[in-house]
Amino acid sequence: MKYRIVSLGCPKNLVDSEYIAGRLERAGHILADDAGLVVVNTCAFIADACSESIETILGEARKKTGADMRLVVTGCLVDRYGDKLTGLLPEVDLFVGKDACGNIERLVAKRGFFKSCGEGEEPATAACLQRKVLTPPPTAYLKIQEGCNNRCSYCTIPSIKGPLQSRPAPKIEEEFRGLLAGGYREFNVIGQDITSYGRDSGDDIKKLLGRLLSIKGDYFVRLLYLHPKGIDDGLLGLMRSDERIVPYLDIPIQHADDRLLTSMNRGYSAGGLERLFGKIKSDMPDAVLRTTVMVGYPGETEDEFANLCAFISAWEFDNLGAFMYSRETGTPSARMKNHVPKGIRKRRYEKVMELQREISKKRLKRLKGREVPVVVEARETDSMTGRLLLQQAPDVDGIAFIKGNCAIGEIRTGVVTTTTDYDVVVEV
């Protein structure tokens, strides 16, 4: 049967979709636009993501033209709400929980809700060699863990994905070697908090990176989502010692006010963040810093919000993402008092993004006239587009408009000729 996958949410979900695609292909199904089997891999991190997932499911249901067409839903929405969805979304033929994805190729002909694998079946996390990468070379994601033990007060991930489950290092290495052989050169290492890798198995992120970097080759590794309390001298030293690790640190701080950080259960203080970023700036002056912050957390005052803005202004992150607090059922913060009205949350979000726009504009100006590596990703009307390898991660940062003779999939060297608020023009 021809199949199609709609993957919503974060890159971790995309990798899960690739495992699903791999299992379907191994069973003889073929990826195609005119598919009779549609798999929607959902996101349910916050309410808006749930709404988008449901709208996407209903949109795909409206495209069904006959009884032989199959609509399968998996991902976080299924793991968060379980078999309640069968009554809410009768348009869906099959719901598959994360622990049943290791059997998905056998389930697609069935109807109803399946939560876990059958007797003797392997879980989805074991299916690394059956992955069909859905991103074109040279860029791929390398997911090293599932779940999380941090228990931030606002976060639904532990209740959806469960506790930390680190993938075995030999399996990760095997997948890494396969991707290298397939022509991939930029590897984005992902997980809910990759600094916690191996805490459940006696391993750690530094050992894993050392294992991967022992493999010879012309490639780059980018580390995405480094929890501030998990970054130590050993990790920074490893990044400095091997130029194949992109000096790009994605360190979500969420806030910079001590009272709110304590309430969020983040495990560090504003002073701790200052010491960390001071060390990074001192030891790695050319490092690119990215962070994520939250506005409108319950009880956030104007003074506490001002503390966040002052911190952002002082450290001038190259890239920054912001989101408004979302009250999610089952989280400790949902039961707190003094929830910030939506209008105030929106105003604070807009202020942070305006502040970051000016910082980004200033930071990018420093690159004008410099020679930089650029990843070529797509063709537009009058130019190619892509990303600066060192400064821009896939999907979350700005883009590079590329002038000159080049091809999709290449990593080329060029000169930055123009910079804007978030984007650049590069001549190769």
Image: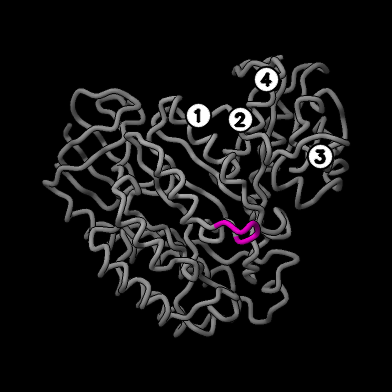
Residue 14 occupies which quadrant of the picture?
A: top right
Q: Which mark is residue 26?
A: 4
387 shown above or below 160:
above
**Tag 1–tag 4 contact (CB < 8 Å):** no
Q: Position of residue 308 (x, y in %)?
A: 42, 76
Q: What type of secondary structure mainly makes up the magenta span? A: loop
Reading the image, the residue beneath label 2 is 129
- Of discs 3 and 2, which sits in the foreground? 2
**Could you tell me which quadrant the C terminus lies in?**
top left
Reading the image, the residue beneath label 1 is 178
Residue 371 occupies which quadrant of the picture?
A: top left
Task: Give the residue type at disc 2.
Answer: Leu
Q: Residue at x 31, y 31 (%)?
A: 376
Reading the image, the residue beneath label 3 is 89
Task: Give the residue type at disc 4.
Answer: Arg
**Nearest to N terminus: mark 3 or mark 4:** 4
Distance CA(mark 3)–CA(mark 4): 29 Å
Q: Is residue 123 left or right of residue 181?
A: right
Task: Give the residue type at disc 3.
Answer: Leu
- Disc 3 crowd rating (10 Å Cα; few below 14, some 14-19, many 20+) is some
- Disc 1 crowd rating (10 Å Cα; few below 14, some 14-19, many 20+) is few
12 in magenta: no
Considering depth in this image, is 43 or 60 the residue closer to the camera?
Answer: 43
**Nearest to N terminus: mark 1 or mark 4:** 4
Distance CA(mark 2)–CA(mark 1): 8 Å
**Nearest to N terminus: mark 2 or mark 4:** 4
Q: Residue at x 56, y 47 (%)?
A: 144
